[in-house]
Amino acid sequence: MNKRILEMRNAAVILTIFPLLLMIGCSAVDTDIAAAPAPSAVPIPSVSTGAIRALPRQANASPSASAAPQTTAQRSIQAELSDTVVIPGDRIGPVTRTTTRQALEPIFGAANLSDQDIGMGEGETEPGTVVNRDAANTFTVIWTDETRTAVAGAMNFGSAWRTPEGIGIGTSFAELQQKLGAFQLYGFEWDYGGSVVLENTRLSKYYGTLILRVAPTEASMERSPNDYDAVIGDELFRSTNPHLRALDINVEEMAVYLEKQGE
């Protein structure tokens, strides 16, 4: 990974969620904080599908004729497209550290790729490529530098992307606690609000490579405003906190690194 990204990572400036790799090892006492306006959610853009379909039957083919057989390359691409497993520190589906921008085209289709400078917080940007599949399958690749020849990580995942444990966008708070065991998270209503601490959990192996942020639904905040007010602010709260259990909380954001800090 290039020197600038490593420096940004150590300075806690990689995206709203990436800096947590340096912060989430702290400990703190649960504290009640005064309420603040709830942040507006960032919508997933509407994107076109990049799915590969089977070859169509010829118009003059007999009713009993089967579709034309697929080539080995087509079958390989379909298998890669159906791979939506995220293994932090290893791969994002078929995308690994050594995947290049050029290598994305035969998998996802050139028309479904959009090169952009991705905002990483505090005015900083990094080169990225948005994979514009359907909303459930979209994600954004973050590159190590402008050559777009090595992958630093990924973010802005659609709901189809899951870790081997089944964690992804939309995972409920109760399910997250089943998979992690008791854990801590930062209070809501600030830059790192709702960020989960993976250290000392059942998934501590992902500490430094996986970032999760949770958020309550607006309906549950309106239904239980006092419970929400009790878990906001720059403090750590235990997942067993009764105020959290009173809210309908789900995983809202996920981001991964393909290298741990210091590697």
Image (cartoon, rainbow, N blue to C red):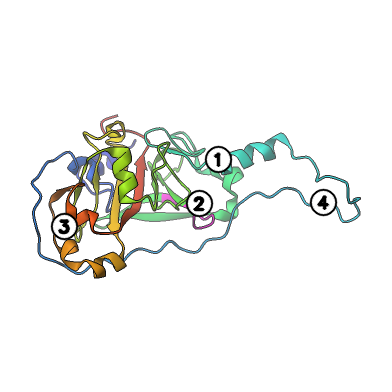
Q: Main secondary structure of the magenta part?
A: loop
Looking at numbered disc 4 in the image, what kind of residue is underneath it?
Arg
Q: Which residues are magenta?
A: 128-138
Under circle 1, the secondary element is helix
**Residues at marks 3 and 2, CA–CA distance in whole angstroms:** 32 Å
Q: Which residue matches tag 4?
A: 57
**Residues at marks 4 and 2, CA–CA distance in whole angstroms:** 27 Å
Under circle 2, the secondary element is loop
Looking at numbered disc 2 in the image, what kind of residue is underneath it?
Asn
Q: Which mark is residue 231?
A: 3
User: Where is residue 215 shown, x and y percent of the image?
Assistant: 28, 57
User: Where is residue 13 shown, x and y percent of the image?
Assistant: 23, 49
Mark 4 crowd level (few <14, some 14–19, many ≥20, 10 Å Cα): few
Q: Which residue matches tag 2?
A: 137
Residue 121: quadrant of the picture: bottom left
Q: Which residue matches tag 1?
A: 103
N-terminal of the two: label 4 or label 1? 4
